[in-house]
Image (cartoon, helix red, strand yellow):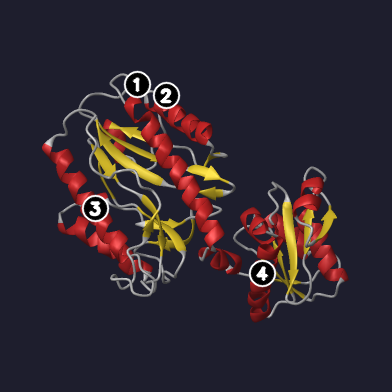
Amino acid sequence: MAEIHATRRSLAQQKIAASGADAALITSLANVRYLSGLVSSNAAVLLPAEGDGVLATDSRYAEAAARDCQDIELITERQVDEALAGLAAVRGYRVLAFEAQDLTFERYTVLAEADGAPSLVPLGHAIEELRMVKDEGEIDLIARACALTCEAFDAVLGAITPGRTEREYAVMLERAMVDLGADGIAFNSIVASGPNGAIPHHVPTGRRFETGDLITIDCGASYLGYQADMTRTVALGEPAPWQQEIYELVSLAQLAGLAAAVPGADVRDVDASARDIIKAAGYGEHFQHGLGHGIGLEVHEAPMMGYGRTGRLGDRVPVTVEPGVYLPGRGGVRIEDTLVVRAATAGAEDAAGPAQILTTTTKELLVL
């Protein structure tokens, strides 16, 4: 793993050099983990445009850092960003890039006003851009997280019965992920039944499942730091015609989104491939969120796929595709997969895919 982290730091240094900065202060914990391998709630990396980097963490994580991050210089300090900014000044770095999306204004002010402080300039999302394209080891970890998610979903599917509450079911599902080998959950599970299904990010409540409900379940396991994300909508009892209609519509839109997720595709076009189908059916106002997002060390990371987003998909980029239709007061449907955008392989019949779908639980409408 040390070799992988060293390679990542080398690629990051190319971006730092291109920015014109002498060094960068990396404070996003996901980015620190990506560049060093350290799992910590308090850590930062000072990475010069040329030369060796420095990892800072506090005494709680010093032993783990010494064990797991032997290829990078380590300092132990409580105020990691201040310590590294001070070190940057001592080493003569005049321009220090920082992660403006992570560093609070209060912390920035402390660094900027320190005696002899280097000039601070925003680095932008340089490290997040590197993280978009995953190596095969990362993809294997995401695939394992997805497999655990699917196994857990299938294991407790039979617990969806009249009278069980949303909250009870969410706890059962999350417990199943851990029991099967997940490190934990990628995010708090969404279990939205009946009219609550019209709320895309509904928080499970004490509402009891009722015959006639559509129930949307959005869940994901975490495995060795990498995340999964899957949504399925099931019917408790035979679905009404309107429920069947919106399920089939969302299913059609999701298949279109999956087909459009190929290397080189503009993220707006991928979003439009699904959104236009829902809009043409008269439900455009009931699909307001983006089509999907990147996934990896964080459950929501670049690239974001939506009508207001920019950029193109690349090879080996894991993303989600998750269209939905949400009818206030009635309910909703969302279908979501985690997949890996893949370039065509030599001799493949398909010009650029299809994508490698990692969440394999059936997307047929399950009637329980």
* Displayed quadrant of residue 207: top left
Task: Find residue 365 and report its horizontal and vertical position in percent.
Answer: 23, 40
Residue furthest top in the image = 163
Answer left or right for 85 relative to 19.
right
Q: Which mark is residue 164?
A: 1
Please tell me whether mark 4 sits on a helix, a strand or a loop: helix
- Amino acid of disc 2: Glu
Q: Nearer the viewer, mark 3 or mark 4?
A: 4
Above or below — where is 208 with respect to 238?
above
How far separated are the C-alphas under marks 1 and 2? 7 Å
Q: Earlier in the sequence, mark 1 or mark 3?
A: 1
Task: Find residue 53 and report its horizontal and vertical position in percent.
Answer: 77, 67
Q: Nearer the viewer, mark 2 or mark 3?
A: 2
Answer left or right for 15 relative to 194.
right
Q: Are marks 1 and 3 in contact (CB under 8 Å)?
A: no
Which residue has dot 4 on it?
7
Q: Are marks 1 and 2 in contact (CB under 8 Å)?
A: yes
Which residue has dot 2 on it?
168
- Amino acid of disc 1: Arg
Quadrant containing the N terminus in the rendered view: bottom right
